[in-house]
Amino acid sequence: MNNKLEPKRVYARALDPIHIGAGGYRLGRVDNTIVRDPATDVPKIPGTSIAGVVRTFAEIVKEEDKKKEEKQKFRDVDIESVFGSKPGENKTEKGILQFYDGQIILFPVSSIQGTVWITTKELLGYWFGEIKDKNRENIKIPDEIGNEAYAIKGIDTDRKLNPREKNTDEYLNLGWLLLEVKKPEDGKEIALPQKIDNWVKRIVVVSDKLFSHIVNDNLEVRTSVRIDPETGTAAEGALFTYEAIPRGTVLGFEIGVDKALAKQKDIDTDVVDKIISAVSPYLRNLGIGGMGTRGFGRLEIDLGNNNGNGGETDAQS
C-alpha cells in the first residue's frame, strides 16, 4: 500500500450566504472581502476552514457520545489520531486526513427564466466525470466556448426576450449580462447525482473567463452597522459592508485519507463518511465561517458517491 492520498468527494449547498473573510478591511466595493483563489479570482472555502469546523463539531459529537450508553457514533474514533495535534500543543502528531479547498461548482444567478446555475465544462468534468445524460450518453459541448451559454438543464431555448421578433436568436440574461443561449448539438440534458439534481433546476455552461466575472458580479453584498451598547443606536463611523457566496450555491470539497498512516494507526479508511455524516447536522444548523449571528453559514451536505458520473481524479500526493 502506497502513501497516496485518495480524496473523498463531499458536496454541499449553501442554505445561507457564506462568508469566509480574507481578513482586515480593503479599499473597493466592500470593506470585508471573502477569500478567493489567486489564479482564478473565484471565491473559495479554504481547506483550513473546513478542517477546523469539521474537527470542532467532531469533538462535540465525541463529547456527546460519552454521555450515551448505546449508539455511540464515535466509540472507536480518536480525534487526535484522525485530525492530528492542535497548533500550540507540545506533541506534533500527524492526522490521517487532508482537507482541500472547497470550490464553487454551480453558482446561482437571477435571470428572466428564474434562478439559473452557471458552471464551466472543466468544473463539471472534474467533479462529475464526463458530462452525460440520464441514458449515460455523452453530452457534446465545444472545448472552446465564447460569449455564449450552453443550456444543459431546464432552460427554455425557444423563449425569446421579445416574442414578437421571430427571427432573432435566443438570449438569456445572467444578472446584468445578456448572452446568446445555445443547446448542445445532441439537445440532451445533464444527469447529476440525485440530491444535486434536486438542488438545481436550470444549468448553463459558460467559459472560464465569463464564469469568474459573473460570479464576482453576483456575490451578495450586505451593509451592517455596529450598535453602541450605551445608546442602543448605530455607533458613529461604524458602518461597514461585506460580501458573501449566495445561498443556493453548490460547492465541492475533497478530503484525502493517508491510507498508509491509517493502516499504521489501525483506523478504517471509511472514517471520512462516518465523521461527515455525524457533523452534517451541525453544519446544517450552526454552519461555517463568519457572520453566523447575522444568519450566515449553514450548509446542507451530500456525500453522494466518490466519483459522481464515473469520473476519476488523482489526488495530490
Image: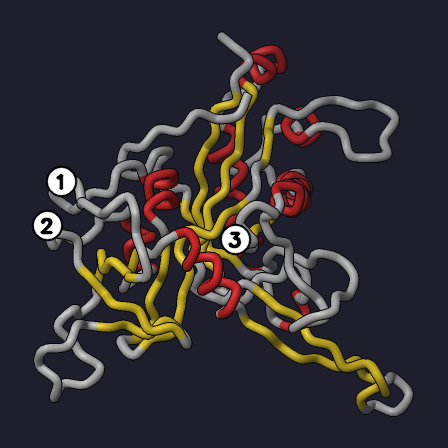
- Amino acid type of the residue that numbered disc 2 sits on in the rendered structure: Asp
| The C terminus - image quarter | top right
Q: CA distance from mark 1 to mark 2?
A: 10 Å
**Given this view, does label 3 or label 2 mark the residue nearer the observer?**
2
The tag on residue 137 is 1
Query: For the point 61% across and 59% down, which residue is it?
Result: 286
Local crowd size for mark 2, using a 10 Å CA cut-off: few (<14), some (14–19), many (≥20): few
Mark earlier in primary sequence (3, 2): 2
Q: Is residue 140 left or right of residue 197?
A: left
Secondary structure, mark 1, is loop
Above or below — where is 174 with respect to 87?
A: below
Residue 76 pos. (x, y %): 59, 26
- Amino acid type of the residue that numbered disc 1 sits on in the rendered structure: Glu
Q: Would you say the residues marked 1 and 2 are in contact, meaning their CB atoms lie under 8 Å apart?
A: yes
Instruction: State whether residue 72 appears in this view.
Output: no
Query: For the point 59% across and 58% down, which residue is it?
Result: 287
Query: For the point 51% across and 57% down, which residue is it?
Result: 299
Residue 119 pos. (x, y %): 37, 54
Q: Is residue 213 left or right of residue 56?
A: left
Above or below — where is 246 with respect to 289?
A: below
Q: Would you say the residues marked 1 and 3 are in contact, meaning their CB atoms lie under 8 Å apart?
A: no
The tag on residue 193 is none
Q: Nearer the viewer, residue 214 or 154?
A: 214
Q: Is residue 243 left or right of residue 248?
A: right
Residue on which disc 2 sits: 186
Q: CA distance from mark 3 to mark 2?
A: 41 Å
Q: CA distance from mark 1 to mark 3?
A: 36 Å
